[in-house]
Amino acid sequence: MSETTPDPIVSLTVAAAHQLGYSCRVAARDDVVLSGPSGNLRVGLANLRRMAADEPRERWPALVADYIGTGLIELDVADDPLDTDDFAMMRGLLRTRLYSADAAGADVVRREIAPGLVQRVLIDRVHTMAPVTATMARDWPVGEAELFALAEANTRGDGPLDLVTHGFEQPNAERVDIAMLCGLSDYITAHARWLGEDYPVAGPAGAVFVVPSQRHIYAYPVTDTKAVRATTLLAQLAALEYTRRPWPVSQDVYWWRDGRIERAAVIDYAAEQLRIHPTEEFVAALDRLRS
């Protein structure tokens, strides 16, 4: 008879749930259902596994306990629902961030920012967030464009992100400095919308950037032909973080210019080799820089 090795993340999740007074049932490899005094909650473990991969094993119990405790806040919030009909109260809670176009959410308020990338409006509840649905928005005295503008103004008004520069060096090649935007905000990816306005990361032809996860934006100014090598570096960063970091967004490379976002390059794999396919528009912009 073969023996199955216990899944340490699931085992720690069950233990953390029991300590909080909840039973825990495994629904799938990366999903558990918690049942207790406040009701039932389905919790995904995919992001937790990615978080644990960056931590030493001895930190896992505390990490899992914090993750499960944060998840259970959703049940407490459900017991104290917001009056979403009161738009005067809701308008100050609106925020926004970017997601993969493949992310679930049929009834959520969303718009395409660029191929593969969508923007959503969210309600910020300090320890958790909830999507604004089309049903909610229909009863509010603003149109969709104004709703996104308000959510962006609130998010931008929370203050800028931290900007850290990482230098990448290779033999016989000039150093390339990639800017990383990061911080404690839950809405980091939204700042891609005003990338070249609030941050010194844009050149005459804008900036190339990636949003591999909800945790970081990496960017480089499109000033000269060094942007070609920077695009390759950004693609490599995005491919790595997209497959390893929690809350993945996209592994493609995007292009900010004049307040608009376009896709600069599509990333895929052939025989496990990373391939970069720049768009015709981006190639044309690079050709103009060469001339």
Image (spheres, rainbow, N blue to C red):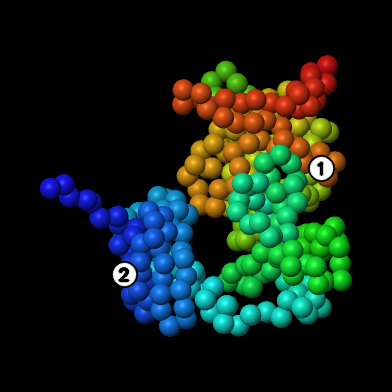
Which residue, given by chain and number where applicable, does mark 2 sit on?
A: 15
Of the numbered discs in the image, which one, if any, rests on residue 180?
Answer: none
> Of 285 and 19, which appears nearest the observer?
19
Q: Is residue 280 above or below residue 142?
A: above
How crowded pointer 1 is (Cα within 10 Å; few <14, some 14-19, many 20+) is rated as some
Q: Is residue 91 above or below residue 233?
A: below
Q: Is residue 200 above or below residue 16?
A: above
* Residue 142 percent coordinates (x, y): 86, 67
Disc with the residue nearer the chain's start (2 vs 1): 2
Of the numbered discs in the image, which one, if any, rests on residue 260?
Answer: 1
What secondary structure is marked by label 2? helix
Left/right placement of residue 16 relative to residue 117 reads: left
> Of 226 and 108, which appears nearest the observer?
108
Name the residue located 62 percent from the left edge and 67 percent from the top edge. Answer: 129
Name the residue located 78 percent from the left edge and 67 percent from the top edge. Answer: 137
Query: In terms of image quadrants, where is residue 167?
Result: top right
The amino acid at mark 1 is Arg
* Residue 14 percent coordinates (x, y): 33, 67
